[in-house]
Amino acid sequence: MKIASIETIPLRIPFTTGGKSAGGVWGPKDLQMVDSLVVKITTDDGIVGWGETFGFTAIPSVKVVIDNILAPELIGSDVTRREKLQGDLQKKFHVFGRSGAFIYGLSAIDIALWDIAGKAAGQPVYQLLGGSEATSLAAYASLIRYADAELIRTNVRRAVDSGFKHLKLHEVDPDVIRAACEAAGPGVEITLDVNAPWTVREALDMTEKLRPLNLRWIEEPVWPPEDYAGIARVRKQGGIPVAAGENASTLMDFQHLLEAGAVDFVQPSPAKMGGITELQKVYALANAHGVTVMVHAFYDGPGLLAAVHGSAALGGAKSLVEWRYFDLEAQLYGDAIIPRNGRIDVPQGPGLGIEPNPDVIRDYRFKP
């Protein structure tokens, strides 16, 4: 089979967050729309595969790269040569950067090619990756930043009452973080993603304040996020397990991160770092370094499904899946992937296992 066409589809879906959100790395204060970019690849045999790239305000640049640079290179290529295509295109276009739009675009394409491979074989992607006994995985509700103690209490209770036993906060104020932990109560695991705001010294000062809260991990505590020696220092001296990796873009980035001894949990993001093909390699690296993989998946489409399949097959039943805790006006997969009692089903259909709703694509498509 060969690639016959590649189509990029930007989606903009209104959402609420249980109150006004604070500004964050994902967008401005009171953000009420979430943008995503899905990629549709059709083979000359008529099989359709779906991928997803990192979204938000990165969408216009990624769309241009896929439409004008990557797609023309890929039309007519053998769909089974995923790893060769990934390597060739990374090498050919490395002068444009080893992160950002090019790697994001390749990630979406790779996920779509895995979807096609599964459909052609009549198997779910997790089976192609080696199989799994897990039919569902625990999910953690990944809350947006509120920067308000009362709002965080309300939304933590809402998530816990809906069945989540694991939560991720995106707060940076110790008082707000403490309020969230108090609202969650015993038996609920809290992780904290601060999105790389601090110097090493500032991060160590913060970990001293946060240590009594018994966080499962603190994520990306240091600016810049590629300061792996600095992150390693926080891990060694801060007294809280450290997670990082969503901003690593290539296998070499992950190698450097792990060699530095910087993390207890490594977080590859399949829609940002090369898709499922590269995700397999990160798992192998992490296993060699004795580090646990917790796949980053702040997505609602094929990027999320890629994380579920990869986590089930490569991480096993103890993996956690990130669930973006937004109240979306429409879900690309309806209710098929929504967690129930804090668990998300591993799709059993061929490929990624679920097809996007064409009505959602029609109604929420926009021109960036």
Image: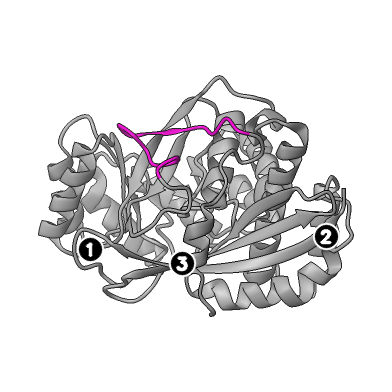
Please tell me which residue is depicted at 71% across the width and 61% down the height of the picture: 106
The residue labelled by disc 1 is 146
Residue 248 visible in the shown view: yes
Mark sitting earlier along the chain (1/2): 2
In-image side of 95 versus 182 (left or right): right
Residue type, numbered disc 2:
Ala
SS at badge 3: helix
Q: Nearer the viewer, residue 209 or 152?
A: 152
Q: State the mark number for residue 355.
A: none
The residue labelled by disc 3 is 363
Q: State the mark number for residue 4.
A: 2
The mark closer to the camera, 1 or 3, is 3
SS at badge 2: strand
Q: Is residue 92 above or below residue 210?
A: below
Other residues around mark 1 within 10 Å, as few (<14) / some (14–19) / many (≥20): many
Outermost residue toward the top? 133
Mark sitting earlier along the chain (2/3): 2
Q: Nearer the viewer, residue 242 or 134?
A: 134
Q: Is residue 339 magenta?
A: yes
Magenta extent: 335-349
